[in-house]
Amino acid sequence: MAALPLRIIYLLRWHKPAGRLILMIPALWSLVLACRSLEILPPPDLTLVIVLGSLATSAMGCVINDLWDQDIDREVERTRNRPLANKSLSLAVGAVVLVIAAGCALGLATYLNPLSFGLCLAAVPVIVVYPLCKRFFALPQLVLSLAWGFAVLIPWTAVTQSLTIPAWLLWGATLSWTMAFDTVYALSDREDDRRLGINSSALFFGDRVTIAVTCFYALTLVLLGFLGYWMNLGSPYFYSLAIAAIGWAWHWQQLKFLPDSPSIYPRLFNHNVILGFVLLLGMVFS
């Protein structure tokens, strides 16, 4: 009996917290900055809803991904031991877990105002279709980035009931950041994806993938810098932005000089979580 909860934990990827936190980070960025725009502190109840909502949405996305991709996952080194791929969990159990995760996400969304609730509903088709995109779309990471963008729009509207220029700047920065870190993540599966005929940004950019990732990081910095200027954020924010710039420059160095070292890809992905929280601290103390 004890093995079933453990397999469900693996299904939800809770044994890999970086993937859960990296969705929560832009949601917290949005919450903090939206509240700052109104000169209020983040309400504890809304903060809890945003945190739990990001976890429920991430769980839902993981199960949807595994239900669509179980046959592909069996053929990929990194994913072949996922519970649905290796059949240690049945499809019925996966479906039940999906219903529970979706129900939790929906229940939390009802706490929000109508605009935010509508954005929650609008995010669902993007989350559902994302795993399919690798079969027919050259840049599936772009679809994931759009899904990540809802993590900015929903908290912002939950606070302000509107979408202003700073919200869209943060949205653009989040899309660019997601394209960068998920392209890095996709490098781990590059050879398996090529063999299986699966699309990814890592394959799309080919030999220029390091340049592409660096450009996405640079665009993220530009948008976040302009956001700080627009919102008149204080020096702690710009210090955190400088730390992120140094971190992303180190990523460029790793990708350029260690391009054939697969162990660096998950390390760089996890490092983005740290940099994301550094930026969050900069926003809080600004």
Image: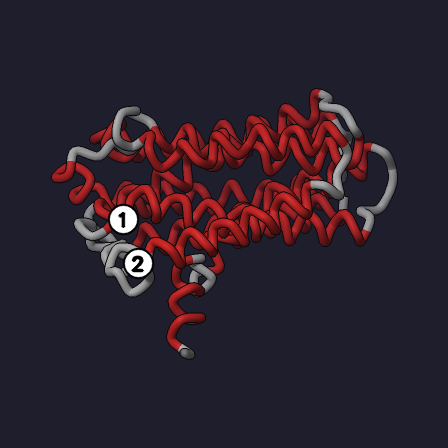
- Give the secondary structure at mark 1: helix
Q: Position of residue 141 (x, y in %)?
A: 38, 33
Classify residue 202 as left or right of residue 130. Answer: left
Q: Residues within 10 Å of mark 1 (few under 14, many from 20)?
A: some
The residue singled out by tag 1 in the image is 70
> Which numbered marker is on residue 235?
none
Classify the position of the N terminus by image quarter: bottom left
Figure check: 233 above or below 172: below
Which quadrant holds residue 257? Answer: top left
Q: Position of residue 186 (x, y in %)?
A: 30, 42
Cα separation, mark 2 vs mark 1, equals 8 Å
Q: Position of residue 148 (x, y in %)?
A: 52, 36
Classify the position of the C terminus by image quarter: top right
Which quadrant holds residue 242? Answer: top right
Q: Position of residue 241 (x, y in %)?
A: 60, 41
Circles 2 and 1 in contact, beta carbons < 8 Å:
yes
The residue singled out by tag 2 in the image is 82
Under mark 2, the amino acid is Arg
Relative depth, front residue between 253 and 15: 15
